[in-house]
Amino acid sequence: MTEEVNMILDDAKENMEASIAHLEREFQKIRAGKASPSMLEGIKIDYYGTSTPIEQTANINTPDPRQIIVQPWDKSILPELEKAIQAANLGFNPKNEGEVLRISVPPLTEERRKELVKQSKTEGEQAKISIRNVRRNANDMAKSLEKEGTPEDEVKRLQEKIQELTDDFIKKVDEHMEKKESDIMTV
């Protein structure tokens, strides 16, 4: 195989791996009943006039599966943290204890579990779409190689390898989705 063919395959594989990594990050945000510091990711507070991620202003711990402790480095921002967590609409009601915020993570209802499964399936479908887009781009690049004079049979082999790669990554997405669904539905 030529250098261009290898480059197309490597590029496609790298982009598909990025799709899987993105899916894993999105799945971490979908709670499966257990408390986790990543549940508060993406929440920003007004920290001295600057919109700052919550993890850059406080220490976030989970002492047990049902609660999250947010301990700010600057105690004066506790009310700001409390407002930001409530405004994030995660279903949490933080309790201000003077030094820390204690967040009790309520157990999931059956209805909420089904909503979360639906949300995780949507994320999985987005990952599959992303992988298929990578496949389409790689196939377009393969066709352009054929126009540049690469033998037709070599381009066909490249397209077959791209399809194998796509099938492998789609299978990985399905496995991630099954695992997440079982995590969510396990009481």
Image (cartoon, rainbow, N blue to C red):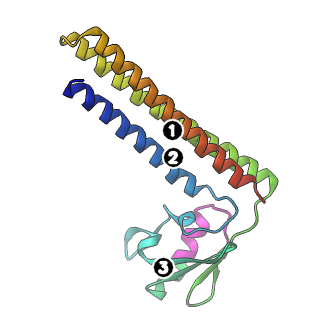
Magenta highlight on residue 89: yes
In this rendered view, identify the residue nearer to me: 179 or 110. 179
Question: In the image, is 61 to the left or to the right of 32?
Answer: left
Give the residue type at disc 2. Answer: Leu
Q: How crowded is mark 1: few (under 14 residues within 10 Å), some or many (20 or more)?
A: many
Q: Are marks 3 and 2 in contact (CB under 8 Å)?
A: no
- Please determine whether, in this image, residue 17 is positioned above or below residue 151: below
The spot of residue 169 in percent (x, y) is: 49, 36
Give the residue type at disc 3. Answer: Asn
Q: Name the residue under label 2.
A: 23
Q: Which of marks 3 and 2 is in front?
A: 2
Question: In the image, is 174 to the left or to the right of 141?
Answer: right
The Cα atoms of the two marked residues, 3 and 2, are separated by 25 Å
Give the residues in magenta: 81-93
Q: Mark 1 points at which residue?
A: 127
> N-terminal of the two: label 1 or label 3?
3
Q: Do the residues labelled 1 and 2 touch (CB within 8 Å)?
A: yes
Residue at point 18%, 10% (across, down)? 149
